[in-house]
Image (spheres, rainbow, N blue to C red):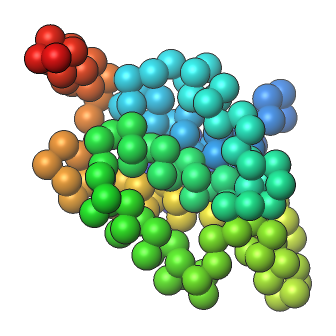
Amino acid sequence: MGNRYTELAMRLRADTFVKYNCTQAVLVPFADACGIRAEQAYQLGMHFGGGMKMASVCGAITGGLMVIGMLGGGDEQYREFMNAMRGSHDGMVECRDLLKRNKEQGGEKRPHCDAMICEAVDLAVKVMSGTERGIYDKNNRLAELERIARSD
C-alpha cells in the first residue's frame, strides 16, 4: 500500500458495518478528487462488484477505469491501465477467470480481491499522476467543471 487512496480502500474493505464491493472500494477513496460525495461514489459502484454481479469484468478494474475517466483520463490512460492489468494477470480481466485461477493456485477469495483493489488503485494513481491534470482536489475539479460549463 503505497498511497493514501490504497490505505483508505483497505480501511473501507475492513469495515464490518458497511460492505464495500471491489468497485466501491476503488471508487470511494477518490470521491473528493472526482468532485463527488463518497455516498455518490458508493452508489455509482453498487452494481459493478463481482464483475457486474455476473462474473464479468473485475470490479476493481471497472472502478479503476471509472476513476480515470472521472479525473479526465482519455484513451491513452485507458490503454496504459488496461495493458498493465492484463500484463499482470496473463491477459485476464474477467472476475470469473481471475477467481478460478486464484482458487486453482490455492488462494482465498477475499485476499485475492483485496490485492486486485490495491493494484487498481495504485495503477490509477500512477496513470493519472503522469498526466497534465494529475489527481487534484475537489475545488480544482469543480472550478474546471464550471469553466467547461460556461464555455458551452
Give the residue at x 66% y 26%. Answer: 43
| 26 relative position to 83: left or right | right
| 1 relative position to 13: left or right | left
Give the residue at x 79% y 83%. Answer: 101
Q: Where is residue 73 shown, x and y percent of the image?
A: 30, 49
Task: Name above or below for residue 91 compared with residue 71.
Answer: below
Seen from the viewer's position, the closer of residues 15 and 150 is 150
| 137 relative position to 108: left or right | left
Q: Is residue 82 visible?
A: yes
| 22 relative position to 41: left or right | right
Task: Name above or below for residue 16 compared with residue 78.
Answer: above
- Which corner quadrant of the image does residue 143 belong to? top left
Task: Name above or below for residue 115 compared with residue 35.
Answer: below
Seen from the viewer's position, the closer of residues 136 and 73 is 73
Give the residue at x 64% y 78%. Answer: 92
State the count of labels: 0
Image quadrant occupied by the C terminus? top left
Give the residue at x 46% y 69%. Answer: 82
Q: Where is residue 123 shown, x and y percent of the image?
A: 43, 62
Q: Is residue 117 visible?
A: no
Q: Where is residue 41 shown, x and y percent of the image?
A: 57, 28
The outermost residue toward the front is 152
Q: Where is residue 151 shown, x and y percent of the image?
A: 11, 17
